[in-house]
Image: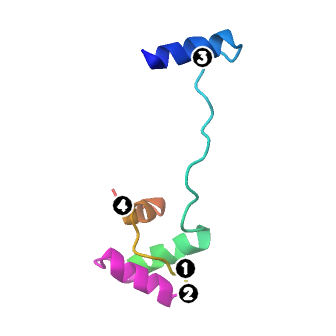
Amino acid sequence: MSFVNKLLQRQRAGGGVAALAHRGGPAPLLDEAARTQLAACVAQQPDATLDELRALLVAAGGPAGGRPHHGLAGLAAVGLAA
């Protein structure tokens, strides 16, 4: 019921009930160049674990980072994860 109340309040304030624009989210951890390097690392060693891919990426001059919490998101960003 809270959602409906918020919509009605927004409509009364003149804002309408259309969906609000996306407000962002966390910044991507890999820029375009790093995603290209990641794709090359996966092509080089397609059966690598996420830790091995991170090591390959760093060895190729990519960004060094901690153990990824969302490692598959990086692979999905370059079209390599389902």
Q: Nearer the viewer, mark 4 or mark 2?
A: 2
Q: Are marks 4 and 1 in contact (CB under 8 Å)?
A: no
* Range drawn in magenta: 44-61
Residue drawn at x 39%, y 65% as measured from the top left: 69
Q: Are marks 1 and 3 in contact (CB under 8 Å)?
A: no
**Whole-number angstrom distance, CA of label 3 to CA of label 4:** 36 Å
Residue, disc 3: 17
The kind of residue tagged 1 is Pro
Q: Nearer the viewer, mark 4 or mark 1?
A: 1
**Whole-number angstrom distance, CA of label 1 to CA of label 3:** 42 Å
Q: Nearer the viewer, mark 2 or mark 3?
A: 3
Q: Is residue 42 something that shows in the picture? A: yes
Q: What is the x, y in percent for residue 27?
A: 58, 58
Mark 4, secondary structure of its residue: loop
The kind of residue tagged 2 is Gly
Q: Nearer the viewer, residue 18 or 43?
A: 18
The kind of residue tagged 4 is Ala
Residue, disc 2: 61
Q: Is residue 45 something that shows in the picture? A: no
What's the mark number on residue 63? 1
**Whole-number angstrom distance, CA of label 2 to CA of label 1:** 7 Å
What's the mark number on residue 81? 4
Q: What is the x, y in percent for residue 13?
A: 69, 13
Residue drawn at x 35%, y 82% as measured from the top left: 52
Q: What is the x, y in percent for residue 71?
A: 39, 66
Which image quadrant: the N terminus? Answer: top left
* Magenta residue check for 63: no
Mark 2, secondary structure of its residue: loop
Q: Which of the two labelled residues, at mark 3 and mark 4, occupies the earlier sequence position?
A: 3
Q: What is the x, y in percent for residue 44?
A: 39, 83
